[in-house]
Amino acid sequence: MRPMVRSVLLCLAATAALAAAGCGNKEDSTNLGSTEGIYVTVDDLKYQVQVSRILNPEDREDQAYLIGLPAGEEPARDEVWFGIFMRVENDTERERPAADQFKIVDTQGEEFEPVELDTAINVFDYEPRPIPAGELLPKIGSAAADNTIQGALVLFKVKTGSLYNRPLELEILSRSGHEFDATVDLDV
């Protein structure tokens, strides 16, 4: 076989191998997100942590996220407000209920539950509602979807010491009880 023909055949074989490697079922979500931005699936819905961060009550932007706190709800001296901004996608063909239970766990096993905000006055709060087929939470056109973060807020009070026990993990608990929960490693 001539060198030119052999080179062409090798190039064709390499191209076919690359094309075959790109085919097949790609898993675009899982139940373990090794970092924020990864899609995780719970009850057929895709959850994506857009960003997580400490919220500063003295910062003008963060003040808007903290509207609607229960009366007297303040972090202790050894606690901070910690916000997780999440997006949930329903790409199924039927309405699905969004998760209503979350917790943060540090590497020492310390657990933190969300602080409930008044959704009537906090436009950024994550409200666990049924998501119609093909739609998102936060709802397109809402303040939470249209701001720079593009996610609904799940608010926690976290002990300052736990910020050093990284990674912090967000657990998203299944509503059905028979589907898998999901875990996302949070960037702190």
Image (tube, rainbow, N blue to C red):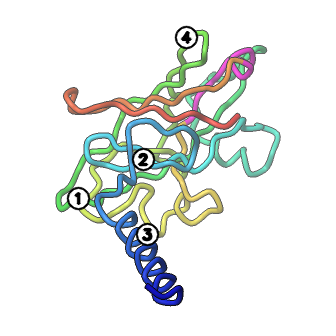
Q: Is residue 171 visible?
A: yes
Q: Residue furthest right?
A: 58
Q: Is residue 51 left or right of residue 121?
A: right
Asked if marks 4 and 1 touch (Cβ < 8 Å), the reply is no
| 161 in magenta | yes
Q: Which quarter shows the N terminus? A: bottom left
- Residue at (50, 48) in percent of width and height: 38
Q: Residue 59 placed where, x, y %? A: 81, 45
Q: Is residue 122 visible?
A: no
Tell which circle, 2 or 4, labels the residue nearer the N-terminal end: 2
Tell which circle, 2 or 3, labels the residue nearer the N-terminal end: 3
Image vertical order of residue 68 relative to residue 112, above or below: below
Q: Residue 159 placed where, x, y %? A: 69, 17
Tell which circle, 4 or 3, labels the residue nearer the N-terminal end: 3
136 and 48: which one is in front? 48
- Residue at (74, 14) in percent of width and height: 161
As measured in the structure, the alpha-carbon distance from the residue carrying label 2 to the one carrying label 1 is: 13 Å
Q: Residues within 10 Å of mark 3 (few under 14, many from 20)?
A: few
Q: Which residue bears the numbered disc 3?
A: 18
As measured in the structure, the alpha-carbon distance from the residue carrying label 4 to the one carrying label 1 is: 34 Å
Instruction: Report the magenta residues as a range.
Output: 155-164
As measured in the structure, the alpha-carbon distance from the residue carrying label 4 to the one carrying label 3 is: 44 Å
Q: Which residue bears the numbered disc 4?
A: 109
Tell which circle, 4 or 1, labels the residue nearer the N-terminal end: 1
Q: Residue furthest front?
A: 1
- Residue at (42, 61) in percent of width and height: 139
Q: Determine which of the numbered discs, if any, sits on residue 92 in the image.
A: 1
Q: Residue 152 placed where, x, y %? A: 51, 49
Query: Identity of the amino acid at label 1?
Result: Thr
Q: Which residue bears the numbered disc 2?
A: 47
